[in-house]
Image (spheres, helix red, strand yellow):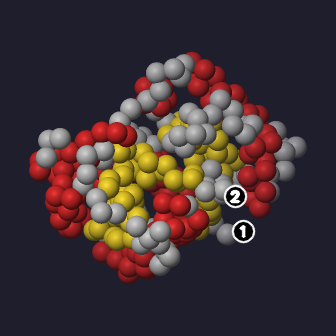
Amino acid sequence: MKNQLFYSILRYRHGLILGETLNAGILFFDPRNRQFSFEKGELKRVAASYPNLQLNFLKNFIGVLEQNIKKVNGDFTYQVDSTELGRFVSKELLFSDAAGLTFDAIEEIPLSEKSTFEHTKDYLIQLFLVGKGTTTSNRIKRNEEYILEEVNRILKDRDTDFLSKIERNRTVQTELVNFTFDFYWKSSDSHFAKAISLDLEQAAFLQNKALQIYGALEQLKSNLSFLNSLSTIDVLLTKPHSKSLFKEFDKAVQIIDSIALPHQIWFEESWEGYAEELIDSAENLNQYSG
């Protein structure tokens, strides 16, 4: 049996129209012993984002999920096949769209002697759940939150009224996908900005994430916003901390860069130039507020 880890992110989606999601937890599956485990996210943070959402309501559904996991793990009559994990999860663990909670597609990560199940599990918790996981070092994790904080800081330093020039969480829809960009701004053309962290710790993570982003962006070709070639996707990227992954990072960038849509990739050292361009040329978007 291959040494591997399977995981799926549990997301809370407040409404289909907005398309916005927040991470509520991560489900793990260890094929060696056919056991599930679940790491709960900060539910208070999820509830705080939506005033009408009752925290206890969310906790109850998470509680049902945890009870189902306990039942499945303790009952040897369940035959969990790793090739049908998605179907098993939706049938036995959490019904689809329970209180807005949905699992992503199951992801598989090959493991090695250096990348054990527990080490990789802890890393995924740190990556996807804010404030969770064991801190393995004091270095700053340059994740998507870090990217947006840095870009917002640079913008604010140059123009305290920059918020009037951007629209946050702009969702682009097609028949197959809803993709939410982190912010939108408009000058002579339209700019859809997306923060993507490639500050990861394994080559497989880099490739998987690049392929996911590529696949999602490719689906947007049919959207009217991009048919006239007057819209640009601005990709704000961070690179891995480990120099040993720079070669894999270059490959990941090439995957993203191969999308058949007008786009530009902005690495960390070029964010100040990006902010200057936005401040100098962006129109006021007050008409989009609210």
Q: Nearer the viewer, residue 152 or 130?
A: 152
In the image, taking residue 132 as reference, residue 150 lies left or right, namely left
* Closest to the observer, 18 or 7: 18
- Judge the density around disc 1: few (<14), some (14-19), many (≥20) Cα neighbours within 10 Å: few
Determine if residue 192 is in view.
yes
Q: Quadrant of residue 68?
A: top right
Amino acid type, residue under disc 1 in the picture: Met
Q: Quadrant of the C terminus?
A: top left
Separation of marks 2 and 1 at Cα, in angstroms: 8 Å
Q: Earlier in the sequence, mark 2 or mark 1?
A: 1
Say which residue appears at 47% left-offset and 31% top-offset: 46
Give the structural element (helix, strand or loop) at label 1: loop
Residue 108, given in percent of the width and then of the height, sits at 62, 62
Q: What residue does disc 1 label? A: 1
Q: Nearer the viewer, residue 226 or 168?
A: 226
Check disc 2: other Cα within 10 Å, few if <14, some if 14-19, many if 20+. few
| Residue 67 against residue 162 in the figure, above or below | above
Residue at 55% over, 43% down: 19
* Residue at mark 2: 32
Q: Secondary structure at mark 2?
A: loop
